[in-house]
Image: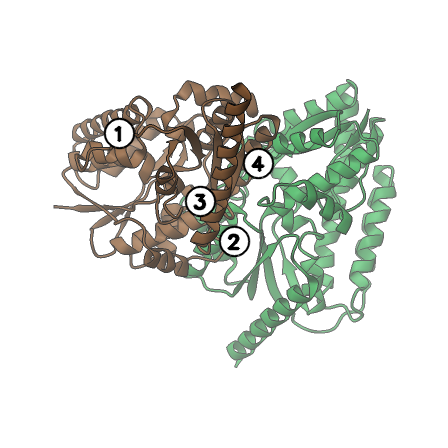
Chain colours: A brown, B green
Amino acid sequence: MIKVGIPRALLYYQYYPMWKTFFEEMGAEVVVSPPTTQTMVSEGSSRVVADTCLPVKVFCGHVLSLVEKCDYIFIPAVRSVKRRVYNCSKFLGLPDMTKAVIPESPPILDIDIDVNQGKRKLYHNIYKLGRHFTWNPFKVRQAAIAAWQSFLIYQRLMSCHRLTPPQAIAKMTGEIEPKAPSLTQTTIALIGHPYLLYDEHINHRLIHRLEQADNKILTPETLTKEELQSAIARLVGRAYWTYEDEIVGAGGHYLQSGADGVIGLMTFGCGPDSLMMDIVRRASKLGTTPFMSLTLEEHTSEAGVTTRLEAFLDMIHRRKRRQVKVCA
Amino acid sequence: MRIGMPHMGNLYIPFKALFQRLGVDFVIPPVNNQHTLSLGVKYSPEGLCIPFKLTLGNLIEAAELGADTLLVPGGSGICRLGYYVTIQEQILRDLGYNGEIISVGFSQHKLSGLLKTIKHLSNNAPWPKIISAFRFGLAKLNAMDRIERIVQKVRPVEEVKGTANQLFTKAINAIDKANDYAPLKKVQVDYINQLNQVTKDDIQPLIVGVVGEFYVLLEPFSNLDVESELGKLGVEVRRTTFISEWTKFTLFLNPLGVNEKKRIHKAALPYLKRDIGGDGWESVGEKVLHAKEYDGLIHLAPFTCMPEIVAQNIMPSTKEDIPVLTILCDEQIAKPGLSTRLEAFVDLLERKRRAHNN
C-alpha cells in the first residue's frame, strides 16, 4: 500500500480531515508526523536560511521526521481559496522550497490550488494529483467529493459544536472524546493562525495554561463566516489575505463582544501578520477590551511567555472585580 | 491641488515633468535620507519591510510640505505591497493628515488605470495633452536609464574613482532641467559622450549581477548604493531591472502578449514551478539563466520579504552554480558592515577567476 506522509504543520490544522479522506479513498495509507518537538524545530531550522519564519522551520522539521517513513509527502501550494484573495508567498513556494532544502525527502505530491484560474483548472489539478494513484477519473472524482464532505463536517464540528481543530480531528478519527468545557468566569479570545494556536510546542502550551487558570478560551474557528466577514468589512473593507479571517475578523469581533481580553499570537518575521496584527492593535485602542500581542520565535523562552500571560490575566481579573463593585 | 508621492530612485523626475506639463502643483519630498527613514520607522509597525517604512517617511514629509493629494503605490499581488495603502492611510490619518489618498495600482488596469488617475489629478485635462505629457515623462525616464547603463559600465574601469558618479549626478540634474525633447536629446548625447571619454584602465572587470526585490534594487538609499560600492571595487554591475524597461513591458507590451520575463521564468522552472509573488521567481530564474556570464550574484532583499526568503532558500540548490551574496536591507544596515562583506565577496570571485584561468 502506498504511504502518503502529511506533516503536522501549517495547513494541516485547516485541511487534514479532507486530505486524509482523499488519500484513503484513493487507497493510500496516511502517515502523519508526530507532534512538534524541540529536535524537530532545531533540525528544521538548520536546513533553511535564518530569516525564514518559525512555522516554516517547524514544517521542515516535520518533513524530516517523515523521511523514510512514507513513499510520498503531500505538500500543496495553496495560492488562493477565494477570488482575488491571496496567500503568503511561503505557502506557494512550499513544495519547491522543501525540495530544495531537504533533497533526501521522498517525492513530493504537490497541487496548485488557485480559484482565480477557474473551476476547470482546479478540477484538472485535482485529477493530476489523483493520477499518482489511479488512472480512473471517476475514482478521483468520488474521492474528491468524499474529501469535500469530510471538510464540511470538520468545519461544522468547529463552528457549531465549538470544538478546536485538534478536538475536531480527534472526534472525526475517533481517538478521544473532547472534554466538556468547565464553567468559568473569564473569557479569553486567542487570535492567530491555527498552526500557532494548536501547536503546543511552539506556543508553550498556551491554551493549556489559560485553561488551568480557569479561563474559557475562544478561538477564531468557533466563529461563523458571517461574524468574521462583518468584522473584516468594518476594519479593512475587503479581505486581501487568505487567512485574514483568523486575525482581523476574529480580532475585530472579539474586541467588540464576547471576550474579556484578546491575545494575538504571531511569529517573528511573518509578513501578513505584521500588517494584520497592527490593524487589530489599532482597533483595540478604540475600544475597552484589553489586547496583548505575543510574538513567537524559536528563541522565545517559556518564562517570558508565562510572565506576560500572568500579568495580562491579573489585569483582566482586577478589571472584572472593579466592574462588579461598581455595579453593586 | 498639491500632489505628493514617495520616492523610488530618480522616478520623481519623469513625474515632475509630467505634472509640470499639465500645470499641476507637484511637491517633491526631500530625497531619502536618515530623517525620512527615522520618520518611517517611528510610525510603521515594526515587522514591516523597508520599502513600506521609506515610502511612509516620504509621504509624511510630502504632507508636511503641504501636499493634499498623496499617491500611494498599491495594486494586488501576493506580497504585502497590495496592503500598503490600507495601513499607510490609517497611519497618516492618525497623524492628522486629512487630504486625499489615491492608490496607484499597477497590476490590474495598467496603462488605462494610470492614465485615468492622471486625468483625475490634472483636473480633467484634455486627453491629447495628457498623452503628450505622459510621453515626455517617459522620454526623460528612458534618457536617465540609458545613461545609467553606461555609468554601470564606466564605474569599474574609470581611472579616477567617482568620475562616473559625478557625471551621473550632473546628467540627472540636466535631464531634470530639460524642458523639451530637443534639449533632452542634447543632454543625453552630451553625457553619453562625456562618459565614453572618461579615461579608463585597461582591465577586464569581474561581472556581478544584481537581482532581487524591485524597490531595494532601484532605491540606492535603501541598499547603501551597493552598485557604486561594487564599482569602486572594480566590479561591473549588470542589472536587468530598470524602471524604463518595466514601464515599457508592464504598461505597453505585456497587454499585447509580449512577456520579457518568460525566458527567466522558464529558466527557474526546474527549481520553482510557480510565481510566488514579488520578484522571487525572477531572482531564482536570473541565477540559473546568467550563471555562465556572471562571476557572481548579489541578491538584494528587504528584511522579512516573503518571496525573497523563498528564493534565498531555493538558490543554493540549483545546478548552475555561481557564488551568491544575499544582502538584507533594513534600517539596521550599515556601510562598514556592507563594505566588508562586499570586499570579501569580490576577493572570493577574483580568486575563483584566477584559479579558473590557470
Mark with earlier residue (3, 4): 3
Q: Name the residue tied to disc 3.
A: A90
Q: Amino acid at mark 4?
A: Asp
Q: Nearer the viewer, mark 4 or mark 2?
A: 4
Residues beneath discs 3 and 4 located on the same chain: yes
Q: CA distance from mark 4 to mark 2?
A: 35 Å
Which residue is more in the foreground, B323 or A325? Answer: A325
Kindly report the distance in space between the C-alpha atoms of the residues bearing marks 1 and 3: 37 Å
Q: CA distance from mark 3 to mark 4?
A: 21 Å
SS class, disc 3: helix
Q: Identity of the amino acid at label 2? A: Glu
The chain ID associated with circle 4 is A
Gap in angstroms between the C-alphas marked 1 and 4: 34 Å
Kind of element beneath mark 2: helix
Q: Which residue is mark 1?
A: A180
Q: CA distance from mark 2 to mark 3?
A: 20 Å
User: For the residues marked 1 and 2, what is the alpha-carbon distance in whole angstroms?
Assistant: 56 Å
Q: Could you tell me if the residues under marks 1 and 4 are in contact, i.e. CB atoms within 8 Å?
A: no
Left or right: A88 as drawn, with respect to B3? left
The three-letter code of the residue at mark 3 reads Lys
Chain containing mark 3: A
